[in-house]
Image: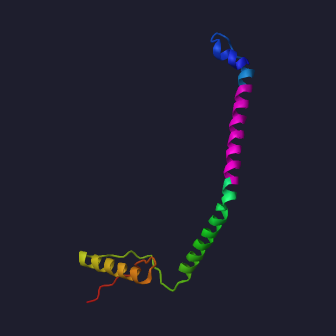
Amino acid sequence: MNLLKLLVDKNSQMSPGEGALYSIVSILMVFVILLIIIGVTTLVFKAYGLFDLKKELDAKKNATKEEVKSSSVPTSNKEVVISDDDMMAAVLVATIDYRNEIKKDVRVVNVREVK
């Protein structure tokens, strides 16, 4: 009731103790509302089973990463140097053709010019 009186009567003063009390109550209300929102969203996600779906997707992603790591493709950290436009076109065509053939993502490891 005091807060309403302060809002209506612009000449009245609020003590620092009352101001601190109103601030603490307001902060607590914000945190309670946030906890309610978190609780509701958690219940909604559990009801629809989205947590289980996320676990399945993470398991599949980890399996594919292990598959890529265990492949016998040699990896190197050398930078591929492409000297002219014809070489760039040849690399792109070969990469696209190989990707369409195996239906997976590919990576260029090495480029050599055959003379």
Q: Is residue 67 above or below residue 36?
A: below
Residue 77 in the image: state x and y as whole percent: 45, 76
Quadrant where the C terminus is found in the figure? bottom left
Residue beneath the point at 31% across and 79% down: 93
Give yes or no for residue 32 being in the magenta stretch.
Answer: yes
Q: Is residue 1 above or below residue 73?
A: above
Total count of labels:
0
Residue beneath the point at 56% across and 80% down: 67
Q: Which residues are magenta?
A: 21-43
Q: Nearer the viewer, residue 24 or 6?
A: 6
Quadrant where the N terminus is found in the figure? top right
The colour scheme used to paint the residues is: rainbow
Q: Is residue 87 above or below residue 10?
A: below
Residue 70 in the image: state x and y as whole percent: 56, 83
- Examine the image and state in which quarter residue 36 appears: top right
Q: Residue furthest bottom?
A: 115
Q: Is residue 89 left or right of residue 75?
A: left
Residue beneath the point at 35% across and 81% down: 97
- Examine the image and state in which quarter residue 44 appears: bottom right
Residue beneath the point at 53% across and 84% down: 71
Q: Nearer the viewer, residue 55 or 76?
A: 55
Q: Residue furthest front?
A: 48
Residue 88 in the image: state x and y as whole percent: 29, 76
Q: Nearer the viewer, residue 46 or 68?
A: 46
Q: Is residue 33 above or below residue 62?
A: above
Give yes or no for residue 94 being in the magenta stretch.
Answer: no
What main secondary structure does the magenta stretch of the protein show? helix
Residue 51 in the image: state x and y as whole percent: 66, 62
